Amino acid sequence: MKIYNTMTKTKEEFVPIKEKEVNIYACGPTVYNLIHIGNARPICAFDVLRRYLQYKGYEVNYIQNFTDVDDKIIKKANEEGVSSTEVSERYIAEYMRDARGLNVLDADIHPKVTESMDKIIDIIKVLVDNEYAYEKNGDVYFRALKFEEYGKLSKMPIEDLQTGARIDVNNQKEDSLDFAIWKAAKPDEPHWDSPWGKGRPGWHIECSAMSRHHVGRTLDIHCGGQDLIFPHHENEIAQSEAATGVPLAKYWMHNGYINVDNRKMSKSLGNFFTAREVAEKYGYEVVRYMMVQAHYRSPINYNIELLDACKASLERLYNCRESLDRAIGVAKSGEITNESKEIFASRKEQFITAMDDDLNTADGITAIFELVRDLNTMSADSNTSKEQLIAGAEVFDELTGVLGLMYNRNNEQEIPQEILELVEQRKQARKDKNFTLADEIRDKISGLGYIVEETRQGVNITKK
């Protein structure tokens, strides 16, 4: 498998640090509003990455943070007259609703900034002690140019970075590129005690601290949207590597932008859409399909025509699978022909070849639709054996499952919130190795009429 590494700007053979274990850190949302379609793209794209690596036999440790303290959250809280915690917890819940609607697997760990403050303060102490950071009036800044490789991810000259950086007028900084890793407390803002006084962390330092705590000093893959390359990921690299002396990640993956009718999405232009409002009209699965039908690094031009095309493509997939079910129900037992075995093997190889080429979901979907053509021909032939149709359905389910599609099949009723909460409790019990409790929760779920299965693609919940 090859991955395009933003750091080297080349496709590289993927070789994880440990032979069959992959650690991935994905930058998560700042939770002050519903996610928009641009936010939904990395969520879906890197969910497919995770699923495909699991499909390939890797044990994947997937971490996605929540930024739950931030200027935007504080502003929202002040406008509503509530606490920042109330705002962030509300929108974490809304995020989970949208993510599950998009069939995105829960991260193994969803660390929060507010729950990681000691880890954040620890790494800032290291940076201050080794003089990569300095304190001024309760603020702490990172000396960007002291890190000699600053700019190595974005590949921009320092002069251009200085021009493009979001720099507030601040006479406290030694250099315009220096950035805050700790901010002194302001009136009526959430704050924490630190060696530099009461305050809260800057945006970039949180991911450095959380990834180091939950994974270690070097990640296999760090991923996020293209807009995070500079300054967020550039600053993460500088902080982390200045503190540890080793690379933050082996591979950097960034998804492309979403434009709306060939224009950048913006509230001021009136072309800003949340994932939920699009899903209310088209369904979450159409939104997910839109995200995976294009290569993750390619731009997507969002418009009604694209949504209609995605909806039609999904209908073709569902029609094929329903035709298979009907044909299986009436077919006679018999052998699977060698020709069919070769077709199934060829389509799987075609799909895997595409996905091994930097997660090329566009060509992967092409392989699936060629399989659809083959299966439609088989379903229409009364001489096709039941075993052959079942084998074809298994390949179909396998490949669409890697892309996280077809999840509304036989799932007309929404899973009740009570069941979802029990599943989360069972997941935590298994993580804590409390298997007795996990079994008790499973039996309770079963008593309520649902079955929970752990699969290579994640937890599957089905009604009895």
Image (spheres, rainbow, N blue to C red):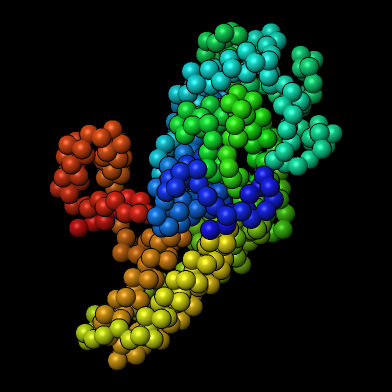
- Is residue 313 shown to the viewer in this render? no
- Taking the spot 68% from the left edge, 15% from the top edge, the residue there is 131
Q: Residue at x 61, y 45 (%)?
A: 252
Please state the horizontal and vertical placement of residue 197, each as a whole percent of the image: 59, 7
User: As displayed, is residue 437 above or below residue 293?
Assistant: above
Residue 318, image x, y percentages? 40, 71
**Residue 397 position (above or below residue 428):** below
Q: Quadrant of residue 442?
A: top left
Q: Name the residue rendered at 50%, 57% in the picture.
A: 288
| Quarter placement of the C terminus | bottom left
Q: Left or right of 387: which side holds 295? A: right
Foreground pick, 248 / 307: 248
Q: Is residue 370 above or below residue 334?
A: above
Left/right of residue 411 with respect to residue 259 in the rendered view = left
Q: Quadrant of residue 229?
A: top right
Q: Front-most of 118 and 60?
A: 60
- Where is residue 275 drawn, in percent x and y? 53, 50
Can residue 124 be seen by looking at this rendering?
Answer: yes
Nearest to the observer: residue 256 or residue 159: 159
Q: Taking 310 as reference, is 140 above or below it? A: above
| Image mark count | 0
Q: How far across and down, in percent of the image, does residue 411 sit?
A: 32, 60
Q: Residue at x 64, y 55 (%)?
A: 11
